[in-house]
Image: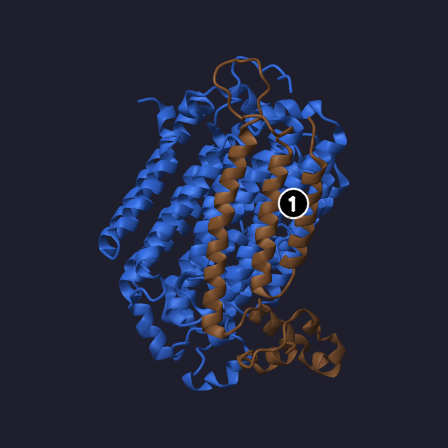
Amino acid sequence: MTLESLVPLVVLVPLLAAAGVLALGRRLRAQRLVTVIALTLTLGISVALLIGVDAAGTLVVEVGGWQAPFGIVLVVDRLAALLLVVSSVVLLAVLLFSVGQGLAYGDDETPVTIYNPAYLILAAGVFTAFIAGDLFNLYVGFEILLVASYVLITLGGTEARIRTGTTYIVVSLVSSFLFLASIAMIYGALGTVNLAHIAVRMAEIPAETQTLLHVMLLIGFGIKAAVFPLSFWLPDSYPTAPAPVTAVFAGLLTKVGVYAIIRTETLLFPSPELNPALLIVAILTMVVGILGAVAQTDIKRLLSFTLVSHIGFLILGIGLGTIDGTAATIYYVAHHIVVQTALFLAAGLIEQVGGSTSIPRLGGLLALAPSVGVLYLVAALNLGGIPPFSGFLGKLGLFQASIATGDPLAFVAVGAGALVSLLTLYALMRVWSRVFWGTPPAPADEESTDAVEPTHDDVYPATGAVAIAERARAIPRLMTTATVGLVLAGIALTVLAGPLYQYAERAALVLGENGYVTAVFPEGTPEVLDD
Amino acid sequence: MTVSLVLVAVMAALFACGVYLILERSMTRVLLGILLLGNASNLLLLVVMGAPGVAPIVDGDTGERVTDPLPQALALTAIVITFSVSAFVLALIYRSWRLAQRDEVDDDVADLAVRTEREGSEFAAAPDLIVDDSEFTEEPHPDDEPEPQSAPAGEERSS
């Protein structure tokens, strides 16, 4: 068995498992078992691919034996392999968290038959997008994960989720139509949808047409990645979903958009003409996102705004247009997927223990549930960029790469990034001091805190100290274990920062030196076809 | 590559109408907008296919002109995706109607809460800041009254 034959399996295993799980119907225990096995298997395959790709170089699979520009190709380079591993880890951890939640508290949050299949299909969609070697396959991957996310975000069909789900679905659809229209335009201009072939042929068309196609693709991906000013939908729609769903969305869905932007910038349009625009957008995303976070009174909404803000860091690295910048972005993507998901899981634990994610309704949790406090603090310090955590290393890499370019705009971006890191820390520590320190609100003051609108329509349980301590003891071990696992994975990114950063540099080098095209067309690029 | 002007014109009109409809508050109109945008994208795929009227796949090398089959395959996939998503949105609209008797996309409740917490008094003092979008809504349904979820948020909604 060659390594190439493993590539389609990362999509096939979750997809087939989804079918199997759906057939299992209401046998919940079996459903969970199959889902966990499928995602563990995918994690194993991803790790094998990562090791193989790092040793042997980019893997290219020509599906059905059709030659590269004519058939569909699946491509796993170092960037894709790293993202496959990181997203498998996150998917598995969040799945275990939701299993723990479901086992302990019944399944009113996650209706029995739909959650696991939709989750597996979401995984298949994310993996399809990462290994897609042509633009249309990337579109199909996006659609698979989006359709699964539509189901997950409206899970249970409560009024609040329908409302937020509508916003999310309409915005996602607009971005999909934009993407589809750009695919049509690219096919009209170049006569191909194969990514490597597009990269080869792009030089043959006029510069104005190139800019048009470039901007169309970036807007489509920018909506998915939640880049300002296309990020307004995210803090509205994510917080209402169940905690595990929000966590996995925050970790993965926007990053698929970022991945697509990395591919667009490094492979399809390596010319630097739009880089200043990307830098400006990155600065605005960072600043506007974090200012939104500072104003919030709900933990999940606050975290959603920090998510938007940190997408700005990723765009900054891409917008530099250097190999160093891309390497820093690749490291930062891995860091951010893990840490942001861990924070959302910690918020899920806070919700489980404190009965709410609204900051004024919580207090004194550190004494009542110390383990939750530690998990939140480590993840928060990591995201805020306190040394020696990976958030610090990632930001350091980004800032060094920015300064190395000598571009004044990049210097501004470094300043904005430093400010945003401080504000991130401020927003997250405000949660810490209010929620974990302070006094628990008395059960009687329910009326007086009603001025703060709940983001959910569910009834809040009692917030008294006794009730909280009881719930803290009853918290299922699997939920805590899953969160601990992700927080430790975040720390592992620090411990393994050396090898990982070198890996990211090798990945960026392949992207920067046209490695993708030479891997897909090893015998030279195909002749220009007669149209 | 030759392009049919009629197809381009129809596509542009569909895109324009779709964008207009998708900006409405009523979810049913948004759905119609989604359908129009989907059809417009599919037409765009057909436009880039080149001259129509010839078979897409010819058996053997007959030396005849063939139509490019790839955009047709892409359009078929896109049609299926648009179809399934439209079905999902329809279910969503039905669910929203069953739960709240509403066919409109509401403002973000928590967003309003954050805003009114800081600026509640200013909003009360300057009523012209409240956006009136009643022009775009149907005449109010008897059950269409906003839910009394929150006093400050309720004031801002136009009836």
The image shows residue A505 at horizontal and vertical percentages of: 54, 30
Residue A419: image location, x then y, percent:
66, 54
Task: Single out the residue that lies furthest toward the front.
Answer: B53
The N terminus of chain A lies in quadrant: top left
Could you tell me which chain the residue with mark 1 belongs to?
A
Figure check: A331 above or below A290: above
Q: Percent position (x, y) of residue A119?
A: 38, 50
Identify the residue shown where x is 53% and y is 72%. Answer: B102
Chain A: give its colour: blue
Is residue A173 left or right of A59 when viewed as pictured? right
Residue at 43% x, 39% y is A127
Amino acid type of the residue that numbered disc 1 sits on in the rendered structure = Ile
Q: Nearer the viewer, residue B112 or A285?
A: B112
- Residue B30 visible somewhere in the drawing: yes
Vertical comparison of A514 with B113: above or below? above
Q: Quadrant of residue A85?
A: top left
In front of the other: B52 or B87: B52
